[in-house]
Amino acid sequence: MSSADLTLPVRGRGNLVGMLMPAVVGVVIVAIVVAGATTSGFMSFANAKAILASVAVVGILGVGMTAIMISGAFVSLSLGITAAVSAMLFMWTLQYGLVPAIVMTLVCAALVCAIQGVFIGEWGANPIILTIAAGAIQTGVAVGLTEGAMVRPPDNAHEIINSTPFGIPLSIFVLIGFVVIIDCVFKGTFFGRRIFMVGESRPAARAAGMPVGRVMAGAFGIAGVAAGITGILLGSFNQGGSMQLTGTLTFDAIAATLVGGTVVTGGRGAAWRTLIGALAIGVITNILLLRGYSTGIQIMVKGAIVLAAVVLVHVALTGRGKK
Amino acid sequence: MSFAKPGSLTRKGLGQRAKSMGIPLLAVILALVGMYALPLYSDSEATSFNFYNAMQNFAALGLIALGVGLTIIGGEFDISTLGMYTLAGMVAVMAGQDSALIGLLAVLGLAIVVGGVQGLIVAKTGISSMPVTIGGYFLLLGAAGALSGDTTVAYENPDVGATLDREVGGLLSLRSIIALAVFALVAALLRFSRVGRDLRAIGGDRRGALLAGVRVERILVGTFIASAMLAGLGGALLAFSIGAARPDAGLQPLIFAVTAALVGGVTLAGGRGTALGICAGAIALSLLNEIFSILAVSTMISSLVFGGLMLLVVIADAPDLREKVQAARTRRRLASQDESASSAVSEGSSP
């Protein structure tokens, strides 16, 4: 790729990727209309609340996944596991009070992920394999310590997290706040810009003297905080923490990030994109659920969406570049 | 073997080959020592049945290791093998209720489609294979769940499993012999045909290979078809053997496969690795797995050990770490040279 190739058409390519967003929003609206007209139970207040609750969880974890993807480490295949382990940790630490429990959970989750970021950024370890290994270790430790049992909360202090101010789940406010904060970090801080630069080209960032290991650790740290928040919400909602909470979370977070239009190769993306991606995934999952499709079909549809998103974004990015 | 002169290219090649087999063989030897030394650290000892069991495990997971390993040698990474392994078990059981052969053919046909489509996407668009095959993994895993309604499906023909698992020579079964034969076939193909050289070339330097006239697209598509077929064969034979197919095998098979490939001398940067090395890596891990089951170790410990082992090998494989270690070594050597040089100078200057 020549230097002219790198600088000139970026705006044009960005616009093409940007055009995916209206498409995604359009698909969501069409899906809502079609589903509302044909699926019984879709257009109800209770269902809207259910969708929002699942969008919150997938969205927050997806924003963490987005930080990883922008930094050029592609994805973590164990972020859902970290979320489940965080839920267990949160439930266990609740005995020290609500605020200490939240702080401890977030710090631990951030550290667990940041360490993975150091290996990946500093030494160039393969992110997919490293995160799978880290997931196996986390599962081993968590199941070993709890002997596979569900961790129950000591009291009802966590119920405040399940509250619904103005009739909307608290988790939605957390999601919106998290998206705003992370996008501010991405766009408005030195550290955030560095994540994008490392994601655009790691060798170039290294040549420019950037501390790639620390930047990657930071990006994974954001993902860890996201997993921690997800765990706190999930644990509170389910009145306990266990590995079962992992479910298809990792898949959903990856799908939300890709559908939002964050670029798999890194260097481009935004948290608000993932928010919209999570909305799309949430609506589609809900429709499939209401129509009684099996988990298998749901995963299959998400796989097809991921494949389509990967190929479409790639075509949108390179289509202009070739001219 | 040629009678090479000292210092000639062939000699160096032989040395490197010995070096590349060193770690996999060491792993097998360590695992064997662990197996035979069982009475020293536990109340049990290894019987020939345990070796038979280890080879049964090898027959299923070794084949995925070979499939994933081939794609890594080619500079790609096929995560969808995990989905293919799961779906293949389901398809084999459901399509093969009357005849195992039909089930097996259905799996291989499916593998050609799955590998072909993913290979074409990767080869034609140049998208990294990881996001493509993660999408493929979801699709295949979902398809296994959709076919079965998310439940375990039983295979009603126990004769097939009995035939596949009947002991041969105390250590092997028809199933593990099939797996070993497939390994031998792939090893011969990589060693003696152009395909092996081309695969390493596109893994080591894609652009260079293209310039040198390697038909990159064809090799890539072929590799993805091969990895899907290998994973599918492993999954299908396992499902016949245990007489059931599960809708989700978890991440464990992939953890085993990737660790086996890396222990076997494959590097994630691509361009390096042999089928024999992967075979040795897979046998070593199968033996380790069997030691765990003899010791009746909890799944938590084995998950920790296998996860930790995978973490170790992936960190040891990290390219920037190698570079750093090498740079540190060079610095130390230069420093010591400087030191001896300066001490020589000071000695010389002193009267």
Image (spheres, rainbow, N blue to C red):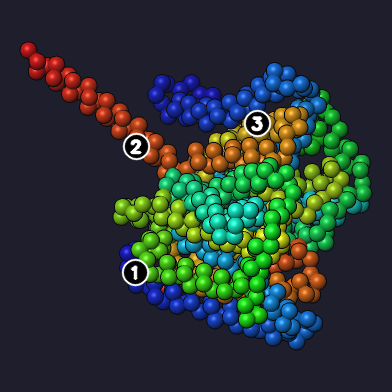
- Residue B195 percent location from the top left of the image: 57, 44
> Mark 2 = which residue?
B327
Residue at 41 percent of width and 60 percent of height: A195
> Mark 1 = which residue?
A7
Q: Chain of mark 2?
A: B
Residue B330 vertical placement versus A138 (above, below): above
Crowd class of label 2 (few under 14; some 14 to 19; many from 20; radius 10 Å): few
Q: Amino acid at mark 1?
A: Thr
Q: Are marks 3 and 2 in contact (CB under 8 Å)?
A: no
> Mark 3 = which residue?
B284
Considering the numbered disc 2 on the image, is that residue within a helix, a strand or a loop? helix
Q: Do the residues marked 1 and 2 share a common chain?
A: no
- Quarter of the figure with residue B48: top right
Crowd class of label 3 (few under 14; some 14 to 19; many from 20; radius 10 Å): many
Q: Chain of mark 3?
A: B
Judge whether residue A191 can be spotted in this image.
yes
Considering the numbered disc 3 on the image, is that residue within a helix, a strand or a loop? helix
Q: CA distance from mark 1 to mark 2?
A: 34 Å
